[in-house]
Each structure stands twice: as C-alpha cells, then as structure tokens.
Image (cartoon, grey):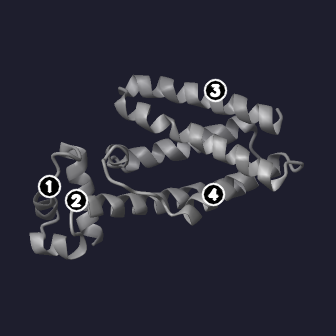
Amino acid sequence: MAALLEAAAAVIVEVGYDAATMTGMAERAEASIGAMYQYFPNKEAVVRALRSQYGAEMEERWKPLAAESATLSIEQLVDRIFEVLVEFMESRPAYIPLLSAPVTYSRDPEARNRLREHFAKLFREKRPELSPEQAFRVANVTLQMVKGLNPIYADAKPKERRELLQEFKLAVTAYLRARLGA
C-alpha cells in the first residue's frame, strides 16, 4: 500500500489531481489496476489516504520543537515552525496539490487538537501565566496563520516563496510577541 501511495503522489505532482488516474497510479507503482482498487475504491480515497499520512507525518515533525522551545526566542521559534513546514512541503511535493483536491476530508478532530495542545504547551512554556484556554487560543490562531501560507506558497515562484515566507514570519512573530511577550 505504501508503494501505491508513493506512486499516486508522484503522479499527482506530475500531472495534477484532475489529470491523475487510478490507471496511471497503478502503472507508476508497477502494480495491476486490480491491486490499486483492492486498497482504494477511487481517486478520492487515495487522496484521503495521502492526506491522512501527511497529517501524521507533519505531527511527528512538530514534536522536536517541544525540546527546543524553552531555549528559543520567539523569533527563533517562528523560524523553526516555518522551517518544519517548508521542509515538509519540499520533501512531500504532492502535499500542496492535494490541498486543493476537491475531496471531502476532515482531519480527525483528536489529531487536530493534539497539534493545538502541543503548540499551547510550547506557548505556556514561554509565558507560564497563560491559562490553558488562552494558550490553546493562541495556538489555534498561530496554526491558522501558518496554514495560510500553504495556498499562496503553492502558487508562487521560488524567489517569491522566500519573500512570502518572510512576510508570514513577520506576521506570526508580531502576533506571538504581543501574546507571549518579547
């Protein structure tokens, strides 16, 4: 199944979601179309599986920040947050095209909250007087701002991506300075 998903991601990167076919994905995986359909009833199921896989991988990439955050300034923390995101997007080129695939997909609410709780914990380490509710709200707003980079980053050329990244870092840093202190 992992080989099928890897092949599907490669096809989506090459031809886009709309032009990607189950047959093309099976051919890329050097598998029969029957094998493809054995695991995935349609292209939407492939996309849901990839999105789920990528969500789990992204969650794992955020975890090392917990160990680092206590020693990082707000600016350094923001740099690390975006570094993790950009490294992920570059290592998983299908991630961006999958974001705009017209598939109904809702990430598991428990997983979404785990990530927000993770960030809330980081922020409470920076400002212990924050209540858990306040820290969760700051985490929620921060993550929405970070996620806002995805669609415009996807449409930008490489030079513009660097500039957009700096703009988002500026906005998130200003927000976190206001909420967590300088």
Instruction: Give the residue drawn at x 58%, y 37%.
Output: 145
Instruction: Give the residue drawn at x 70%, y 34%.
Output: 75
Q: Nearer the viewer, mark 2 or mark 4?
A: 2
Residue named by callout 4? 64
Along the horizontal axis of the image, is 84 left or right of 13? right
The answer to whether the residues at label 4 and label 3 have Cβ atoms under 8 Å apart is no
Q: Is residue 67 above or below residue 143?
A: below
Q: Secondary structure at mark 1?
A: loop
The answer to whether the residues at label 1 and label 2 have Cβ atoms under 8 Å apart is yes
Q: Nearer the viewer, mark 4 or mark 3?
A: 3
Along the horizontal axis of the image, is 94 left or right of 17? right
Q: Nearer the viewer, mark 4 or mark 1?
A: 1
Instruction: Give the residue drawn at x 57%, y 58%.
Output: 112
Q: Quadrant of residue 97?
A: top left
| Amino acid type at mark 2 | Lys
Residue 80 appears at what percent x and percent y?
Answer: 61, 43
| Amino acid type at mark 1 | Thr
Tell me the tag on residue 43: 2
Tell me the tag on residue 21: 1
Closer-to-camera residue (90/44): 44
CA gap, disc 4 to disc 3? 23 Å
Give the class, few, some or many, for how many residues have Cα within 10 Å of label 4's Cα (few <14, many ≥20): few
Instruction: Give the residue drawn at x 74%, y 43%.
Output: 72
| Amino acid type at mark 3 | Leu
Give the class, few, some or many, for how many residues have Cα within 10 Å of label 3's Cα (few <14, many ≥20): some
Residue 123 in sight here: no
CA gap, disc 2 to disc 4? 33 Å
Residue 3 appears at what percent x and percent y?
Answer: 25, 68
CA gap, disc 3 to disc 2? 38 Å
